[in-house]
Amino acid sequence: MNSFEWLIGSRYTRAKRRNGFISFITACSMIGIALSVIVLITVLSVMNGFQHEIRGRILDVASHIQAFGEEGHLADWQGVREDLKSQPNILASAPFVQGQGLLSNNGEFQGVLVRGVVPELEDQVAGIGHHMDAGGSLASLRPGEYGIVLGRELARSLDAHVGDKLRVITPEGNLSPGGMIPRSRAFTVVGIFWIDMYQYDANLALINLQDAQKLYHMGEDVSGVRLKITDPLRAPQVAAQLQSSSRRPIAYRDWTMEDPAYFRAVEIEKRMMFLILTLIVVIASVNIVSNLVMAVTEKQADIAILRTLGASPRSILAIFVIQGAASGIVGTITGVIGGVLLASNVGRIVHFVEMLSGSAVLSPQVYFLSELPSDVQLGDVLSIGGVSLALSLLATLYPSWRASRINPAEALRYE
């Protein structure tokens, strides 16, 4: 394309239409492309935000890798920790005892996951100790004192507060002359944590490792060892390496195995939303086709004059490609700017809507989060902008080709 084609194409873009309906269609095509790009960027950013936020909170609570013993018992866990110290990717390790339990307080019952931990070691592999909402730190879980730390939603459902005593009932029972009696023990609430992730805040209770060994009759054994590694995203590879090099009967399980269906579903949903919402761009691009078809019909005489002055069919095609692509470019740029601004502030907008309506947009029981996160990624923005520009350009080809095929003599016959 030379300066002549750019000059004519840009003048056609700026020129006032004799047919006002063509200008209306042009405006609709620009607005349609801009809105579709805004929606695409916002939706994908919110899905990225959900994935990033939930993954971050899971990694802040769950261990990157867990080493389990046979049948839920791991003996000589001190030796296992010593062996793991020589591994290059391991930052810290901590033993744990894990089991199901039933908490009882003032007639309220709640099933929970009970985890026995060594407070000073647990703080090295997980961040629960940094999310205390009431009471002291995990250091309050002293051996023999039978203290317990609850999630905030769990404490709320049991109407439990710091200093209250509640009873922990385990599935295993003690045989007595009257039959099997559930094993239970009274614990004192010494702390309440809040991670703002419902599945942990409502279903996890922490006690001291030695108290857990007594409660579950583990002796000196533990359920396993929790590991923190340098790069959590490489946990599957590191777990596989540890498994292949292990000389002990230990099973290594990384954090992606805890809820693989969820992360796979989010990724599939993100791809499907991209494909579905791209159809909005396609629909908006159809307006460019109709707009150019009418513009070509309106400017047949101009095309014929340009051809008689020596313009080639290729030049005519380029002129109308420039004219049609202008709508796509303006719409895409406007949509990218608007989409980035909306996606970056969607949390504030949702919070404002919640204040006006007096109700929560997100239910933490369903979405695990109480706030709408957003993560604008440059790759997504560039992909969306590129797809929009490509579709807009493709939409100009047929009408522009039709313009280049106009016969000057036929176009000027009735002028």
Image (tube, rainbow, N blue to C red):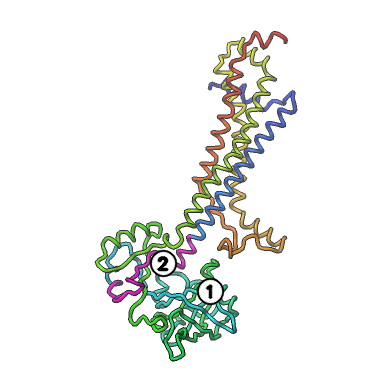
Report the residue marked by disc 1.
151
Q: Where residue 98 appears, x then y in whole percent? A: 42, 74
Q: Tell me the magenta residue range.
A: 55-80
Q: Earlier in the sequence, mark 1 or mark 2?
A: 2
Q: Is residue 243 magenta?
A: no
Q: Where residue 320 appears, x then y in whole percent? A: 60, 23
Q: Nearer the viewer, residue 323 or 181?
A: 181
Q: Is residue 77 magenta?
A: yes
Q: Where residue 234 appears, x then y in whole percent? A: 37, 57
The image shows residue 278, relative to residue 14, as above or below, that is below
Q: Where residue 297 appears, x then y in whole percent? A: 68, 19
In the picture provided, is 309 more to the left or to the right than 357? left
Q: Secondary structure at mark 2?
A: loop
Farthest residue in the front direction? 178
What amino acid is found at the position of numbered circle 2 in the picture? Ser
Q: Residues within 10 Å of mark 1 (few under 14, many from 20)?
A: many
Labelled disc at residue 353: none
* CA distance separating discs 1 and 2: 17 Å
**Residue 357 falls in which quadrant of the image?**
bottom right
**Residue 125 falls in which quadrant of the image?**
bottom left
Q: Residues within 10 Å of mark 2 (few under 14, many from 20)?
A: many
What amino acid is found at the position of numbered circle 1 in the picture? Gly
Quarter containing the C terminus = top right
In the picture provided, is 18 more to the left or to the right than 395? right
In the picture provided, is 209 more to the left or to the right than 351? left
Identify the residue at horizontal 54%, vertical 21% (top origin).
2
Q: Secondary structure at mark 1?
A: strand
Q: Do residues under tags 1 and 2 come within 8 Å of each other at their CB atoms? A: no
The image shows residue 37, relative to residue 121, as above or below, that is above
Report the residue marked by disc 2.
63
